[in-house]
Amino acid sequence: MKITVWNEFAHEKSDPAVKAIYPDGIHAVIAAFLRDAGYEVRTATLDDPECGLTDEVLDDTDVLFWWGHMRHGDVPDSVVNRVYKHVIGGMGMVVLHSGHASKIFQKLMGTPSGELKWRESGDREILWVIEQGHPITRGIGEKIILEHEETYGEHFLVPQPDELVFISWFTGGEVFRSGCVYKRGRGKIFYFRPGHESVPTYHNPEVQKVLVNAAAYVYTPKAEAPYQYGWVKPTVE
């Protein structure tokens, strides 16, 4: 399996506190534990030519990880449309944390913004496993506890997930659908909520296990022939 980890790579350059946690970028940490799991991994960032997501790269990508936050609007529509085409064609995608507001996630969900409640107050988060025995939760107990995370709260303006894997509870009282699987065309998408840039969530072994599992789950072997859309000849004469 070939994975591309895409990261906006902005906070790590502008905020010393974030740089201290992720000195080489969030993408570098994610790529490292995915490589340790045996996957072939490349990285790409917003400031690379064409955001590092050319057709050549995407043709060679089975699963795309996406982390973005402060520069969603700087991703060109041409790149969004290119990624969308590949997801519909069967490329898996794992959308992380505030990637809910990215152009590509909105396009795949058909919702205008993925609106939600949020608060940065260092709340404790408990991620409860909803689907015991789901491949994404393999090796995870009934919950994951994150001592400090950004709070998200319902209502989360997304379609009903095809599979709801995690629900979060925060010490401020909010709950949130934090692990959602969607199917679009031949592609599968997993949205995973934790991962605020100012806390070391991606260094957490249980979070890493979830993302390693998620990569395998959204992977779909490439089809020999794509779906055909638009005008077609009759299949029966």
Image (cartoon, rainbow, N blue to C red):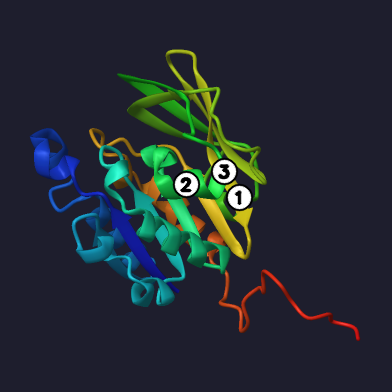
Tag 3's secondary structure? loop
Residue that label 2 marks:
105
Decide if residue 215 is on the left or right side of residue 217: left
In this view, the residue in front, 181 or 87, is: 87
Residue 182 vertical position relative to residue 150 in the rendered view, above or below: below
**Spot occupied by residue 216 in the image (x, y as percentages of width and height):** 51, 64
Q: Dot 1: what SS? A: strand
Q: Is residue 205 above or below residue 178?
A: below
Q: Residues within 10 Å of mark 3 (few under 14, many from 20)?
A: few
Give the residue at x 53% y 28%: 156
Residue 46 shows which numbered tag? Answer: none
Q: In 3D space, how far apart are the residues under numbered discs 2 and 1 (Cα atoms)? A: 11 Å
Upstream in sequence: badge 2 or badge 3: 2
The reply to whether residue 30 is in sight is no
The kind of residue on which mark 1 rests is: Tyr
Residue in view at x 55 percent, y 38 percent: 111
Task: Please name the residue that numbered disc 1 is placed on.
Answer: 182
Residue underneath mark 3: 110
Give, as a three-letter code, the residue at label 2: Phe
